[in-house]
Image (cartoon, grey):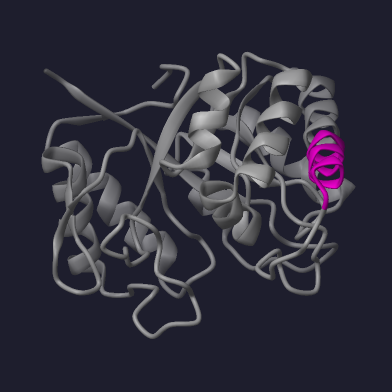
Amino acid sequence: MVQSLDIVSDLGEGFGSYQIADDDSLLKIVSSANIACGFHAGDPRTMASTVQKCILNNVAIGAHPSFPDRVGFGRRGMDLSALEVETDMLYQIGALSGFTKAFGGKLQHVTPHGKLGNFVVEDAKYANAVAEAIAKFDDSLIVVTLPGELAEAAKKKGLQIAYTIFADRAYNDDGSLVSRSHEGAVLHDSDTITKRVIRMVKEGKVTSITGQDIDVNGSSLLLHGDTAGSVQMAKEIKSALIANEIVIKNLAGSN
């Protein structure tokens, strides 16, 4: 059986004249993009430009909504009500959808960013609010997440799910991500990361931070673009995947 994989990166995470990643180079590598929607990063001009570049490069577009935490880059926890989470989600997805529609594109997926992305895996309140917002906005959108509460809430609403695997993030024994506050949470060695990605895709296994082999299952590989050497690393990973006869295509099935 031919294996396939979506390669995705978080894009449009600058603000005004500031950029933290080489989006133009990453757009030549990835098959999908998670675009910041203004709450942790991004602004109307950045969102418009990123959407247009995705369309020009045949890269599928996804919304990357966050807690309203620009100062903390969406990586700080917030105690919000279910209504606040749902309406914040609708606001952000709607904003990106507006730009996408204006330039002749279509939203493919939604994946929560940062601490919100962590919360929805473990907390049913946040998960249900996010799933409710996506279902109300457009129930054809794919929900991209880790296994957990959001995936279960989305399934109950009949939404399509795609699981994420992480190229450069360490895993705990239970399959969750090691907190960025802990040493070793982010991997940097290109060769190690590339070999680990191939094993995750081919064998469905990864070594946790404690040295245990654990199961992983995902059709969306996230490559972070805001770390040193990320573009070269992304190129090496993609080349290795192709060399191992893994077809790169977005979640909607386009190469």
In the image, 126 versus 24, the foreground residue is: 126
Residue 14 vs residue 170: left or right? Answer: right
Q: Residue at image x 68%, y 19%?
A: 106
Residue 244 vs residue 141: left or right? Answer: left
Looking at this view, name the residue that lies furthest to the bottom: 183
On the image, which quarter does residue 246 sit in?
Answer: top left
Expressed as whole percent of the image width and height from the top left, the position of residue 9 reads 51, 49
Q: Residue at image x 72%, y 27%?
A: 132
Instruction: Give the answer, above or below, for where 157 lies relative to 179.
Output: above
Expressed as whole percent of the image width and height from the top left, the position of residue 178 reads 40, 69
Q: Is residue 159 shown to the viewer in this render?
A: yes
Instruction: Give the answer, above or below, for where 182 lies relative to 224.
Output: below
Expressed as whole percent of the image width and height from the top left, the position of residue 69 reads 80, 65
Q: How many marks?
A: 0
On the image, which quarter does residue 150 sit in?
Answer: top right
Classify the position of the N terminus by image quarter.
top left
Q: Is residue 59 shown to the viewer in this render?
A: no
Q: Residue at image x 84%, y 30%?
A: 94
Secondary structure, magenta segment, majority class: helix
Magenta residues? 81-92
